[in-house]
Amino acid sequence: MTANPSETSRWPARARHALRLLAALASAVALAWYSMDTSISIDVTRAQTHTLSTASLSVLETLPAPIAFTAYLAPNHALRKQAEHLIDRYRRHRGDISFDYVDPASEPQRVRAEGIRGGEMVIESAGRSEQTTVYSEQAITEALARLARASDRWIAFVTGHGERSPRRGANHDISAWATVLEKRGFKVQEINLAEYRGVPDNTAVLVIASPQLDFQPAEVGAITDYLETGGNLLWFTEPDAPPGLEGLAHAVGFEHIPGTVVDPVTVAHGVDNPAFLLLSRYARHPATADFNYTTVLFYAAAIHDRAPSGWAATRLIYSGESAWSETEAIEGNVEYNDGTDRMGPLVLALALSRALGEDEQRVIVVGDGDFLANAYLQNSGNQDLGVRFIEWLARDDLMITVPSRAAEDNALRLKDWHKAVIGFTFLFGLPGAFAVNGLFIWWRRRRA
């Protein structure tokens, strides 16, 4: 009896199918074993909702010690899953992050002793701690940024001469910027030098924000003493700065160029006012390292650097070649007048520094305060640049390149009826549609 030739010819095909099945099973087993020790995640959302922002990653790099998160939430609290998902995003980038829950009802003494409120998260690192009740990446990153400060940093704003206020909310004030600084761990206060008779010793940076009136001799003396003892200064000046401050400006290391800077390139971009400056030229300097945003200045003054002996000066921001300092009123079509106006490029921000023992004393002068005003803070890179200036002046160099804006969580919040529609569609709607389509195809084939 001889074997059926057709049956014999099927054995190689069956063997190939068996080998393919074994290979598929071996691959599945290998992948399962590999997945037990390896975690790979890819964020395919358009807004990168499940990926840490650049700001968050930068803050993590500035914290050398392990980080411990503790959420004070009841076992059935709705925020538990959200908290775990959120902290996992930080854990993917650092292996020394721990996360734990504490039930406030089961440990009331601990909650009272630590002054914890219900639903609060405590973040600890290197013996310091911060709290937040907002479970979002932005809130946690801001808390981590505060932990990154080795000690308190006080920013003192001079007041009493019509300066832009870090507390008031008018368009020309700078309260929104001050709030950003506080979220990053700085302490903000206003000081009236006529009352204090001196700058407090714990001041990390003194800010003179566009004064409208002259200082009294005693106030000038207080600022001069502060600088002579190594204090760091940020000065926003304006085209109409009080003439009585020229002596103090000379002591700091700069002087005004008369007029208001205008740029015809701005008009070419569709902006009606030539005093509205769009700037993107920055010096190679730690305060502007890797900064590639456009800065918007409004009615700015150009400045000369006149660094005192022992100081080094860097021209941080400067205009284009077509800009000039207009000495006449900016009305209608402005034109450059040779002899009275100064042609660009013009210096709009200046950094001064000198070695003082083991430290470096630092000063920044900007020919405009509007760029950090409440009305203009959110324009392009204005906020980030203002924060960078403070970080450099406070000598927190590791924090300079940390962006001041963390990505906000964009979680999709569905109502119950939304969930019901989606569930019904996937459980019944789609299978029913496939079944109807199959019956229709079967019926057409039967008729063909």
Image (cartoon, rainbow, N blue to C red):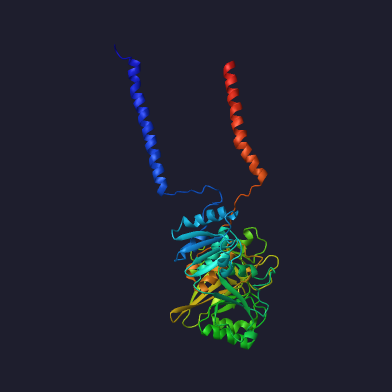
Residue 94 against residue 390 in the figure, above or below: above
Residue 67 against residue 219 in the figure, above or below: above
Instruction: Give the residue displayed 66% in from the left and 45% down from the top.
Output: 416
Identify the image quadrant of residue 153. bottom right
Q: Residue furthest top?
A: 1
Instruction: Give the residue displayed 54% in from the left and 71% down from the top.
Output: 389
Q: Quadrant of the C terminus?
A: top right
Q: Is 332 on the left or on the right of 277, as rendered?
A: right
Task: Confirm whether residue 272 shows in the render.
Answer: yes
Residue 433 against residue 209 in the figure, above or below: above
Residue 254 against residue 34 in the figure, above or below: below
In the rendered image, residue 421, in percent from the top left (x then y), is placed at: 65, 40
In the rendered image, residue 160, in percent from the top left (x then y), is placed at: 67, 80
In the rendered image, residue 243, in percent from the top left (x then y), is placed at: 64, 82
Camera-nearest residue between 189 and 275 = 189
Task: Confirm whether residue 318 shows in the render.
Answer: no
In the rendered image, residue 236, in percent from the top left (x then y), is placed at: 60, 74
**Total labels drawn:** 0
